[in-house]
Image (cartoon, helix red, strand yellow):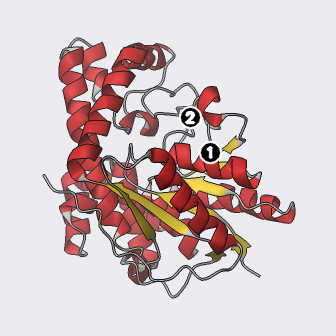
Amino acid sequence: MKGQVITILGPTASGKTALAVRLAKRLGSCVISGDAFQVYRGMDIGTAKVTPEEADGVPHYLVDCLDPRETYSAARFSELAGEIIRKENQAGRVPIIAGGTGLYIQGLLEGYTFLPRGEGRKSRWHQFYEAHGLEALREELLSRGKTEAELPVDPQRMIRMLEVLDLAPDAQAGKSSGLVYSGPVVGLTMDRAWLYERINRRVDLMMAAGLEDEVRRLLAEGVPADAQSMSGIGYKEMIPAVRGECTPAEAAEAIRKNTRHFAKRQLTWYRRMPYIRWFERTRGEPEEIWYHTIEQFVISQIKGEPNGRENEFTGHISE
């Protein structure tokens, strides 16, 4: 029998955390972070990590698990999240995945078989990168049908994407024959201008909360500037400010711009996941009503009731 999990997706700043906590409290469940950077300890502000107040007593997993010097991957996420789902299901609970890292979530839900770490193709693509550089990785991915909007920004993710393409090119194109877990997959979206306003406001709050000091502390503690953890948006832009190569205001503007671009790439990725049930929030609609509508849908799905016609993808974002 399939394991059961509730999945909440959406671009950054769309309200995933609040909905996940609300659902978890309603169902007596937990939240599994599907984010590629919230897993790192001490990286709280730049990852918009859930605070104790926001968590409101709900257990959160795959948060604060790794040292910032360690690497993380879709394969490791699938392994760790799969084990949590299994244990929660055995206890009679349905966990909730909340996150925006498309490859991680898609790989878990569609049951990708990832290549083992160590020798083999991983070594091949690392050698390719070392010999030819980042642009060669980019060209290789473009030659395999990827678009500029889909490409990761760091070489580790590019390498991993090439590994998955080597293994299962059709799966990467969203042609999965089925999901390995049952349960609703909910997508949150909203008007582009409103989403961008929320992103800009989030960056302002991060700066006010001390993002520059957080990056300065991480570097002082010996986290390499080229570590995978420091490639996340918010960190890679702030490093030059900490070094005096630009002003904090310039770094903040770069974070806003790159976060908007990231939101666009997230929505592009989600198009390959046709099983997402989208819920679009409109300006003026009370948050309580929006969340209640989604909550009722999720509960009906968990109980096995029909959900009616699927929503079409509506999250179009363009510059």
Picture quarter with the N terminus? bottom right
Q: Residue at x 67, y 55 (%)?
A: 80
Please, what is the three-letter code of the amino acid marked with disc 2?
Answer: Val
Q: Is residue 297 left or right of residue 241?
A: right
Residues at discs 2 and 1 in contact (Cβ within 8 Å): yes
Q: Name, please, the residue furthest toward the bottom.
A: 177
Q: Which residue position is annotated with label 2?
A: 50
Q: Can residue 128 be seen in this view?
A: no
Q: Is residue 208 visible?
A: yes
Please, what is the three-letter code of the amino acid marked with disc 1?
Answer: Val
Q: Name, please, the residue furthest toward the right.
A: 91
- Location of residue 299 (image quadrant): bottom right
**Residue 46 in picture, x, y percent from top left:** 42, 29
Numbered badge on residue 232: none
Mark 2 or mark 1, whichever is nearer to me: 1
- 10 Å neighbourhood of mark 1: few (<14), some, or many (≥20)? many
- 10 Å neighbourhood of mark 2: few (<14), some, or many (≥20)? some
Residue nearest the viewer, comparing 59 with 39: 59
- Location of residue 128 (image quadrant): bottom left
Residue nearest the viewer, comparing 135 with 259: 259
Q: Which residue is drawn at 24% across and 34% down?
A: 256
**Residue 216 in picture, x, y percent from top left:** 40, 14
Distance from disc 2 to disc 1, alpha carbons, whole Å, reads: 10 Å
Element assignment for label 2 = loop
**Residue 52 in picture, x, y percent from top left:** 64, 28
Q: Which residue position is annotated with label 1?
A: 21
- Location of residue 249 (image quadrant): top left
Q: Which residue is drawn at 55% across and 55% down?
A: 292
Residue nearest the viewer, comparing 138 with 190: 190
